[in-house]
Amino acid sequence: MLSATLFTPICCAIFAASPAIASVGRPPVSRTTSKSTHFTPRRQPVPKAFIAASFAANRPAYRSYLFLNRSQYSRSLAPAKTVTAKRGVRQSGGNPGASIAWTERNVRGIRILQVHALAKFSWLIHGFSTKLGGVSNQNAEKVLNLGFTEWDTKENVLENRRRFLSALDASDLELVSLKQIHSDVIHLFDAAPAETCQGDASITNRRGLLLGVQTADCVPILLVDPKERAIAAVHAGWRGTLQRIVVKAIGKMQMQYKSKPADLLAAIGPSIGGCCYEVGTEVATQFLSQFAEAPDWFDEFRTGDEPNPIQWLNRMPPGHQPPPKNVLLDLRKANRAQLLDAGLLAPNIFISDLCTACRRDLLFSYRKEGAESGRLLSVIAIRPA
Ligand SMILES: [Zn+2]
């Protein structure tokens, strides 16, 4: 029974993901290539060490053994797709579709990332900032910090924003940004608010409102409904992702603007990748409590309460084994899965493969830079008449 509950979600997630992965142009080297033979785990003899480990952890022996089996699958089935990954994690990078779908706009030294499919709408403005072309001083470098941080002056940030909006041809638009709180609070704007609102997503169908989210590792998501002409900007860190903020924003667009998910386009901007985003196993536990496919979003899925076989291999007594490793979480993959679940079509989801932690030459990473980190800004607007 336990083996069924353990494996069913994993298999479902992999099969469900396979056509979607193909659609964003991933090379056909993935676990899905051998799904017919390799995802039918058989109960195998359990080594005595694992029986002992399981007994120590008050857990059935075959469960811990299956956990080991799964990591064996990961190693044996997917050697080719993890060549550049740290700790063997699947990367969102290495995605040839991403480089085709994305384009770069360079205006007076300001470099802005855009999605071709969104840029072709003449009524739409959108863009994801990079750190290049600003006036803020960070480690003897001039950077485009677009968020009000302690280390930077207000004047610098306002000048950076002026440059960014000018490069987007959006100087006349009012920037509607939020005080982000890692929540699932979504605001509908018919006009620019008098005061900054707390929340993590905003939607509108009004012209001239430039919706923005600030990030430095978290996932910025821009949504467009070309039929009903409605837009959204979403900030999804792990807490927002856990709370399905992007799905809720789509739900709000459905309610307010009669948007159909199959019509929507989604652009997932630069964020920390599955290569670098370490979280504690307690985060994995929370994701598993919410999503059956959660194990597919981690490099090796562990909730931290499995018996540690290392303890038996090196003969350490219980309680003296090294603390459990953290796990790597791929937030882009999690949000992409949520978009698909909400009804978006795979070809309408565009994911940047730039990792904020890997590309500090181009982006800001709070994980890497801490309080000295700048903020990226992702914006979207319906052009004024
Ligand atoms: Zn990375």
Image (cartoon, rainbow, N blue to C red):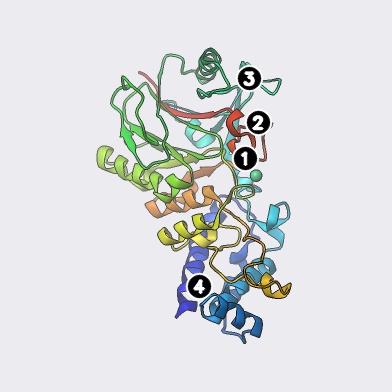
Q: Determine whether label 2 and label 3 are within 8 Å by CB.
A: no
> Which numbered disc, 4 or 3, marks the residue that appears first in the sequence?
4
Kindly report the distance in space between the C-alpha atoms of the residues bearing marks 2 and 1. 9 Å
The mark found on residue 354 in the picture is: 1
The mark found on residue 7 in the picture is: 4
Q: Report x, y in % for residue 131.
A: 62, 26
Using the image, determine if residue 100 lies above or below residue 318: above
Label 4's element?
helix
Q: Which residue is mark 2?
A: 362
Nearer the observer, 306 or 291:
306
Quadrant in which the C terminus is drawn: top left
Instruction: Tell us which disc is closer to us: 4 or 1.
Output: 4
Amino acid on which disc 2 is placed: Leu
Amino acid on which disc 3 is placed: Gly
> Which numbered disc, 4 or 1, marks the residue that appears first in the sequence?
4
Amino acid on which disc 1 is placed: Leu
Amino acid on which disc 4 is placed: Phe
Kindly report the distance in space between the C-alpha atoms of the residues bearing marks 2 and 3. 10 Å
Describe residue 40's horizontal placement relative to residue 196 as left or right: right
Quarter location, residue 190: top left
Q: Which residue is mark 3?
A: 133
In the displayed orientation, state which residue is furthest to the bottom.
45
> Which numbered disc, 2 or 1, marks the residue that appears first in the sequence?
1
